[in-house]
């Protein structure tokens, strides 16, 4: 195993096909340079803020399937 495989950076064509772990659930523009992004990474939802200074993780919670009860952020 080379260093690329060891750190999960093997070329895409050499990786076995698997279900996507990262999914953009929703995005909201707050202005031309600011926004919110809700992404699912595995079994977790992550709310990310975007600004000219970079990205910031604002909140994390377990992923809820559509129709499941659960409060808003």
Image: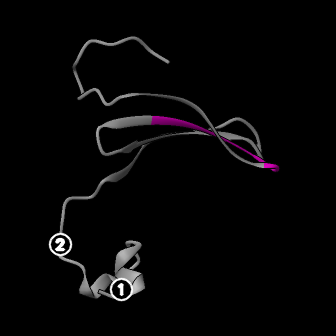
Q: Which residue is mark 2?
A: 17
Horizontal arrangement in the rendering, residue 73 relative to residue 3 (left or right): right
Marks 2 and 1: CB-CB under 8 Å?
Answer: no
Q: Position of residue 70 (x, y in %)?
A: 33, 13
Q: Position of residue 21 (x, y in %)?
A: 30, 54
The image quarter in which residue 48 lies: top right
Q: Which residues are magenta?
A: 46-53
- At 45% across and 15% down in the image, what residue appears? 72
Q: Is residue 23 above or below residue 15?
A: above
What secondary structure is found at the residue carrying circle 1? loop
Q: Magenta region's main secondary structure?
A: strand
Q: Which residue is mark 1?
A: 11
- At 32% across and 82% down in the image, what residue appears? 12
The image quarter in which residue 13 lies: bottom left
Sooner in the amino-acid sequence: mark 2 or mark 1: 1
- At 17% across and 72% down in the image, what residue appears? 17
Q: Position of residue 50 (x, y in %)?
A: 69, 44
Horizontal arrangement in the rendering, residue 47 relative to residue 8 (left or right): right
- Dot 2, crowdedness within 10 Å: few (<14), some or many (≥20)? few
Q: Position of residue 37 (x, y in %)?
A: 55, 41
- Compute the Cα span from label 2 to label 1: 12 Å
The image quarter in which residue 63 lies: top left
Q: Is residue 40 above or below residue 13?
A: above
Q: Is residue 16 above or below residue 43?
A: below
What secondary structure is found at the residue carrying circle 2? loop
Residue 12 in magenta?
A: no
Horizontal arrangement in the rendering, residue 52 relative to residue 4 (left or right): right
């Amino acid at each position: 195993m080379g260093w690329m495989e060891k750190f999960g950076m093997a070329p895409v064509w050499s990786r076995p096909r698997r279900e996507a772990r990262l999914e953009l659930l929703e995005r909201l523009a707050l202005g031309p340079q600011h926004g919110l992004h809700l992404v699912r990474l595995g079994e977790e939802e992550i709310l990310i803020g975007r600004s000219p200074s970079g990205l910031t993780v604002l909140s994390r919670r377990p992923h809820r399937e559509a129709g499941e009860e659960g409060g808003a952020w």
